[in-house]
Amino acid sequence: MQKNNRTKNRPSLIYKPYLTGNWASPLAARRGLKILGYQAVFVFFYIFVGQALMFDNFVLRLVTNALILGAMGALLYMDGMKTGEEDVAYAEIAHSRQQDGQDIPKQERDRCFHPLKGLFSVLVGMLPLVLIALALALTAQVQRYHLGGLPSWLESYRTRQDIGIALAYYNETIPMGVTDVLRIIVRLLLFPYVNIVGTEVPMHLLWLERFSPLLVLLVPMAYAGGYALGPKARAAVHGSIAADHKRRVRRDRRERKRRRTKEPTQLV
């Protein structure tokens, strides 16, 4: 019963015609910079809290990091829906002007809603990071274990001929290459996924790096999904306005009726 009441009280969706804009435009490309900025904020956030989410228990790691990813996706989703609703509102005005015979210039048409504009913004904004992840995916190999620094108490044994040969492995240095730099960047971008997978199994990390171009786009795609629902969000706004207008009309009608009943009857 309560569910039926909630459904009944929910404002209806009222769709109005709007002018469809261009899916690729300088405005949509500039919005991609905002998505790139979101990604930078997420990385900065994970630098500080990421280590605290590296639990030994896999289920706990999965739940906490999935919640963080969901929160980031929800933030982008709501921002995309808000932007889509604003573009639909502008497109409704442009459609009304076009119906009145006015010419709509390209710059204004670029401002109007198009269902693929959010996707274009995501792809443009994330393109540099996707290219970095793609370069790592094509060059990634299984990471092998390397010896660490030589303990200080063994330094005196380097000069001994029978032990020095064995300790010579500690003198080998492995220079940092381009792949290592790419790996650091991608690991920062995929910090939640790295936490979920863990660092114990090298093959798991290898597959994570090979799928990194797709994983980098996973959360930002929430913006594109939210933007595509701009017409529905705008229809909900129109429905709320109409429902509020009906409530005001009913309230005014009841108020007038109450005043009439209170008026004294004049005797002739």
Image: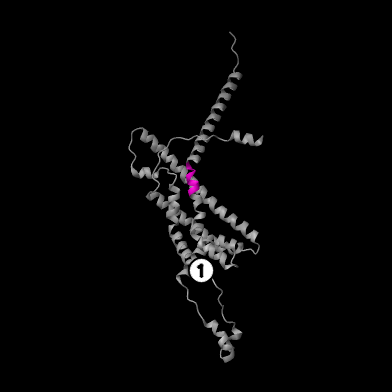
> Between 62 and 72, which is closer to the camera in this rendering?
62
The residue at the point 34 percent across, 44 percent down is 106
Q: Is residue 160 above or below residue 48?
A: below
Mark 1, secondary structure of its residue: loop
Instruction: Please give left or right for residue 233 compared with residue 265 in the image.
Output: left
Residue 65 in sight here: yes
Mark 1 Cα-neighbour bin, 10 Å: few <14, some 14–19, many ≥20: some
Q: Is residue 90 above or below residue 158?
A: above
> Between 11 and 213, which is closer to the camera in this rendering?
213
Instruction: Please give left or right for residue 128 compared with residue 163 in the image.
Output: left
Q: Main secondary structure of the magenta part?
A: helix
Residue 54 at x, y = what percent?
Answer: 61, 63
Q: Residue furthest top?
A: 268
Residue 160 in sight here: no
Residue 229 drawn in magenta: yes
Residue 40 at x, y = what percent?
Answer: 49, 59
Residue under pointer 1? 141
The residue at the point 56 percent across, 24 percent down is 253
Residue 148 at x, y = what percent?
Answer: 56, 78
Region of the chain picked out in magenta, as a range: 224-230
The residue at the point 50 percent across, 46 percent down is 226
Q: Quadrant of residue 194?
A: bottom right
Residue 49 drawn in magenta: no
Which image quarter is the C terminus in?
top right
Kindly identify the amino acid type of the residue bearing the numbered disc 1: Gln
Residue 78 at x, y = what percent?
Answer: 52, 47
Q: Quadrant of residue 6?
A: top right
Instruction: Please give left or right for residue 169 compared with residue 60 in the image.
Output: left
